[in-house]
Amino acid sequence: MTEKSQEELLDRIRAYCLSFPGTDERLSHGAPTFFVSGKKSFVPYYHNHHQDGRIALWCAAPSGVQSMLAESEPEMYFIPPYVGHLGWIGMRLDRGADWEAIAGVITDAYLCRAPKKYIEREK
């Protein structure tokens, strides 16, 4: 991925994450991170986190999704450090992920962390 394409993708991810009710963005652990209700993170964007060589999202995920994705598509999905034990899934953006898949994991992450008052608006 070129630096320009990375910036464009982050801009698109940012716009999508911030389109959900009650969301905001701030740096957390040095990474652009998206929060719901100002306190619960649902998606951080990492570029070479601790020199792991990945451009990736770490996303909250519904129960059972982590193992299903990590086992079925290990070149695209991984179990991220620190939050993997909570069921979160990592998605590599530097492996040609299409927008539909990216939007799907972001939506799932939001729905996992958002309070019911916001989820009702999404239905």
Image: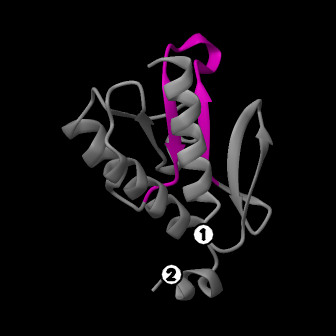
Of 6 and 79, which appears nearest the observer? 6
The local secondary structure at tag 1 comes to loop
Indicate left or right for 116 with 55 as reference: right
Quarter of the rendering containing residue 27: top right
The local secondary structure at tag 2 comes to helix
Residue count near mark 2 (Cα–Cα under 10 Å), binned few <14, some 14–19, many ≥20:
few
Of 46 and 61, which appears nearest the observer? 46
Which residue carries the number 2 mark? 122
Reading the chain from its start, which is encountered first: label 2 or label 1? 1
Q: Is residue 56 above or below residue 23?
A: above
Q: Is residue 27 above or below residue 5?
A: below
| In the image, residue 46 lies in the stretch drawn in magenta | yes
Q: Residue at x 23, y 37 (%)?
A: 71
Q: Quadrant of the N terminus?
A: top left
Residue 48 visible in image:
yes
Residue 58, given in percent of the width and then of the height, sits at 53, 41
- The residue range painted magenta reads 42-61
Callout 2 amino acid: Glu
Indicate left or right for 51 with 91 as reference: right
| In the image, residue 13 lies in the stretch drawn in magenta | no
Callout 1 amino acid: Phe
Residue 31, given in percent of the width and then of the height, sits at 71, 33
Quarter of the rendering containing residue 33: top right
What separation in Å lies between label 2 and label 1 (alpha carbons)? 8 Å
Asked whether disc 2 touches disc 1, contact meaning CB atoms under 8 Å apart, the reply is yes
Q: Residue at x 62, y 81 (%)?
A: 118
Which residue carries the number 1 mark? 20
Q: Is residue 110 above or below residue 69?
A: below
Quarter of the rendering containing residue 17: bottom right
Q: Residue at x 80, y 63 (%)?
A: 38
